[in-house]
Amino acid sequence: GAGTSASSGVRFELEKETELRFEVESGEKVQLELLSGLAEVFGSELNRNKKYTFGPGSKIAVFTWQGCTVCLTGKTEVAYVSRDTPMLLYLNTHAALEQMRQQAERDNERGPRVMVVGPTDVGKSTVCRLLLSYAVRLGRRPTLVELDVGQSGVSVPGTVSALCIERPADVEEGFSVQAPLVYHFGSTTPGTNIKLYNKLTSCLAEVFSQRCEVNRKASVGGCVINTCGWVKGSGYQALVHCASAFEVDVVLVLDQERLYNELKRDLPHFVKVVLLPKSGGVVERSKACRRDTRDEKIREYFYGFRGVSFYPHAFDVRFSDVRIYKIGAPSIPDSCLPLGMSQDDTQLKLVPVTPGRDLTHHVLSVSCADDEGEGGAGGRRGVLESPVCGFIVVTAVDTQAQVMTVLSPAPRPLPRHTLLIMDIRFIDLK
Ligand code: ADP
């Protein structure tokens, strides 16, 4: 089967252990239907004779262990069958992790904590999804830790988060995101504030460990940590930091032997570092494509997704009713720092932002931090370590009237008054 632009369905017969890869053209939709046999999309089983719809730009692989027939309807950019997939290696990885969970159960220990690393566009998120879906299909309750601040699968960009996985990813929509634990980072690359990034990693690790102490299933299920594609310099150090904060047992390195060797050298010997090939199906995404995906993620947060529409609210917020901060002061030469202050302190400092026109279109996180406890030094530290309860976008600023108009998922008033500004902007075209 070659790529097709036919609008009537095209059938594909797949032999066992092969996959059909397709990309949906921009502005188009493609429907997938399983006609016979068994097949899965990134670890989630397809139901027979159900039509699955994929939106513009989707890049999908339909894999079959046993052989199957599927039908595609709509405009695909490419559609081809490949026999050359690393799925067997990924399945073996899952089997090894499952053995560790069984052992953890027997010995009253904790289950595997797995970190997935590699450069951008090697299929890290896809491997995480696969391993989590396979685990949950066996009745496990693993946790997804999302540290990719550029392309978060859980919340809006510029955040890190943790999500307990209770059912396999939905074929069309991915994991159902109910009650994730989300922290504000504020930009799409860890390099903007690596101290903050590492601190948030430690925060998530601590919260996860606390949960494991009181929840046996979570402890046995372990976690799968998705990381950023930045694997050099401070990006590499951030991976080493993450491995130690989470006390990971397994590191899966996708596609990069150098990174594999470095991690083997730098991580404690009891950490299993495994090199896995990337799938030939993983498609490189352009900068523009990444930006669109980020934008879409924010749009979904406010307006919903597919069948589920949300109706966000627009209202005015008085400057005097909120406190807006940016995390991290611009770095200044060591020699100019006040006595007893280090660069770390400047990167983790809450800097008050005076609202002005330049706030327009910025995404703001609404911090869960207690509004009262926020005055003193102790309270301020609390803001960084407090999760986020939601996001708003500033759509207009009136400096004369000292108010800003915001887009919010919930009606006024804001649930909290401490707002953290992101570098990320969203232009609401609705
Ligand atoms: P990373 O997390 O490393 O940046 P992703 O897992 O997000 O990479 O994969 C990049 C893109 O490739 C995604 O759109 C994903 O759906 C797609 N993809 C992954 N594996 C395959 C495959 N086997 N065939 C086709 N597309 C794939």
Image (cartoon, grey):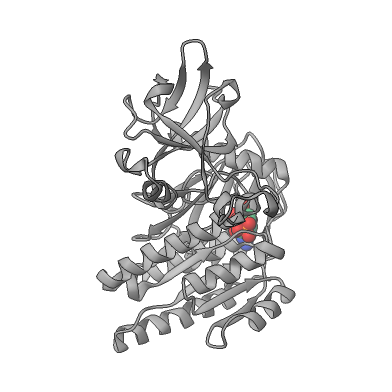
Task: Determine whether, in the image, residue 323 is placed left or right of residue 397.
Answer: left
Can I make out residue 153 in this image? yes
Task: Determine whether, in the image, residue 30 is placed left or right of residue 217.
Answer: right
Depth check, front residue: 418 or 3: 418
Q: Residue furthest top?
A: 400
Q: Position of residue 72 (x, y in %)?
A: 58, 48
Q: Position of residue 397 (x, y in %)?
A: 52, 18
Q: Position of residue 272 (x, y in %)?
A: 55, 83
Depth check, front residue: 46 or 387: 387
Relative to 148, does residue 118 appear above or below in the rendering? below
Task: Determine whether, in the image, residue 176 is placed left or right of residue 22.
Answer: left
Q: How many marks?
A: 0
Depth check, front residue: 424 or 328: 328
Q: Residue at x 32, y 24 (%)?
A: 412
> Image quarter for residue 46?
bottom left
Q: Position of residue 210 (x, y in %)?
A: 32, 67
Q: Residue at x 72, y 44 (%)?
A: 287
Relative to 284, does residue 288 appear above or below in the rendering? above
Can I make out residue 12 in this image? no
Location of the N terminus (image quadrant)? bottom right
Q: Residue furthest left?
A: 214
Q: Residue furthest front?
A: 339
Point out the quarter of the image occupied by ligand 1. bottom right
Relative to 184, does residue 209 appear above or below in the rendering? below
Q: Residue at x 41, y 53 (%)?
A: 385
Q: Residue at x 33, y 73 (%)?
A: 219
